[in-house]
Image (cartoon, helix red, strand yellow):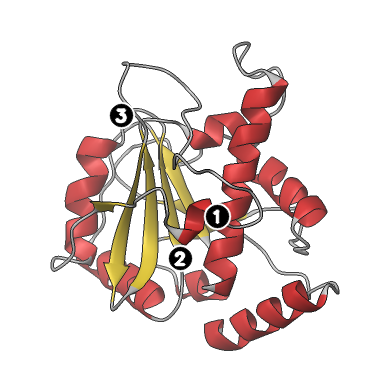
Amino acid sequence: MKKKLSVILVVALLAGFTAPSYKLAKLKYNGGGDWYANRTALANLIQYCNKNIGTNFDTEEAIVEVGSTDIFNYPLVYMTGHGNVLFSDQEAQNLRKYLMGGGFLHIDDNYGLDKFIRPQMKKVFPELTFVELPPNHPVYHQKFKFPAGLPKIHEHDGKKPEGLGLIFKGRLICYYTFETDLGNGWEDAGTYVEDTPEVRERALRMGANLIQYALIQ
């Protein structure tokens, strides 16, 4: 199903006509962390992508649990939060099957997620390790160009942003935005006073690149 959906999306994007409507989903996980953070982010990214890169996402985001078979209905799943994450063995296997079968996971550290998500993703792919993607990686060169790589959106501790990936059989299956809080830049204008229109545009452009890459890779 995912391969068929990808073919339809590629043809639509390249031909310039409207693709069938489909959804993006936010990942609901256990452990007590705030999986529901960045409440307006995905809706704004959806609107931006529909306007700027020719997608036809349903304007309502979906919510999907890690262990649910419903996850296979979504071309991309977004995960965020600040706190604890816990995958059961069944959930880890379900997520693994989803990603191996053509799905894509974007993990967006909302500052505080890192120490929890790394060991949990090791449950999913014990044989893989996050690697930093170079600035010439295609994810930074879709419709919008980021020659220096992942942009810095929110400043917390003075560290550089890192765009990390899990690569399975040559395919990027999980993209982890660390030390930038990309999703905060997708939130409604005014949510964070420091987010100028320029900052929000930069964050949304990077998000659109990620969506475009995930759909056509």
Q: Distance between the residues labelled 1 and 3?
A: 29 Å
- Contact flag, marks 2 and 3 (Cβ < 8 Å): no
In this view, the mark in front (1 or 3):
1
Q: Name the residue under label 3.
A: 112
Instruction: Give coordinates of residue 56: x percent, y percent.
Output: 78, 64
Question: In which quadrant is the N terminus drawn?
Answer: bottom right
In this view, the mark in front (2 or 3):
2
Sequence-first tag of 2 and 3: 2
Q: Which residue is drawn at 21% across and 66% down?
A: 125
Judge left or right: residue 122 versus residue 35. Answer: left
For the residue labelled by badge 2, is the local secondary structure a helix, a strand or a loop? loop
**Extreme residue in the right direction:** 17
Q: How far apart are marks 1 and 2 (CA)?
A: 18 Å
Q: How far apart are marks 2 and 3 (CA)?
A: 22 Å
Q: Which residue is drawn at 30% across and 23% down?
A: 159
Instruction: Give coordinates of residue 86: x percent, y percent.
Output: 25, 49
Q: Nearer the viewer, residue 180 or 92?
A: 180
Does residue 196 appear in the picture of this structure?
Answer: yes
Q: Mark 2 points at which residue?
A: 104
Q: Mark 1 points at which residue?
A: 141
Sequence-first tag of 1 and 3: 3
Q: Which amino acid does label 2 sit on?
A: Phe
Q: Is residue 175 above or below residue 204?
A: below
Q: Which amino acid does label 1 sit on?
A: His
For the residue labelled by badge 3, is the local secondary structure a helix, a strand or a loop? loop
